[in-house]
Image (tube, grey):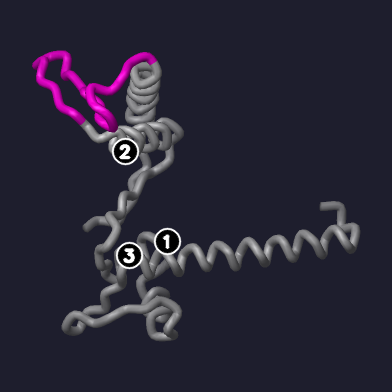
Amino acid sequence: MNAGTETPTLKDQKIAKASFDILINERNSSRSTKKNRVKLVFQETKNSLELPEKAVSILKEILLFMSEGKGITLIPTGIELSTQEAADILQVSRPHVVKLLEEGKIPYHKAGSHRRISQQDLTTYELALKSTRKASLDYLAKQAQEENLGY
């Protein structure tokens, strides 16, 4: 699994925007072929395929983010990550992830000499970290208001 994220080029952004607009317009003006499925027809070959509506929803989000110049990382649930993959997802160094593991902040197990982290445990840590950061920022903002610091 490659958890790396690449930023789309300007050309990719333009293509993604046009594709997103077409997909949104088609979805709003047509019905799916069967419940929870979408039929796509390829213009040149006339081949078609059916996609689950959830896949189309994810595709729309990917195209929207790409059109805005944002990178995308897809991480399947229920997988195990290496320390480098976890570092890439958290946008920190691999040694920092190892430190978090050794401190018990993120559960892991060893496969031979390699540390493995479940995707769910990493997501749980990431959400807890975001929550802690938000609480700290809220506290600082409240203090600034109480002290009339003009924020």
Pair 3/2: label in front: 2
- The image quadrant of residue 102 is bottom left
Q: Residue at x 30, y 54 (%)?
A: 75
The residue at which mark 3 appears reads as 119
Instruction: Give SS at disc 1.
Output: loop
Local crowd size for mark 1, using a 10 Å CA cut-off: few (<14), some (14–19), many (≥20): few
Tag 2: amino acid? Lys
The residue at which mark 2 appears reads as 54
Instruction: Tell whether position 123 is magenta.
Output: no
In this rendering, does residue 14 appear at all?
Answer: no
Tag 3: amino acid? Gln
Q: Which mark is residue 51?
A: none
In the image: residue 135, left or right of residue 101: right
Q: Residue at x 33, y 46 (%)?
A: 6
Instruction: Give SS at disc 3.
Output: helix
Dot 1 or dot 3, earlier in sequence: 1
Q: Which residues fall within the magenta stretch?
A: 29-50
89 w.r.t. 74: above or below: below
Please state the horizontal and vertical placement of residue 33, each as a whole percent of the image.
23, 22
The residue at which mark 1 appears reads as 91
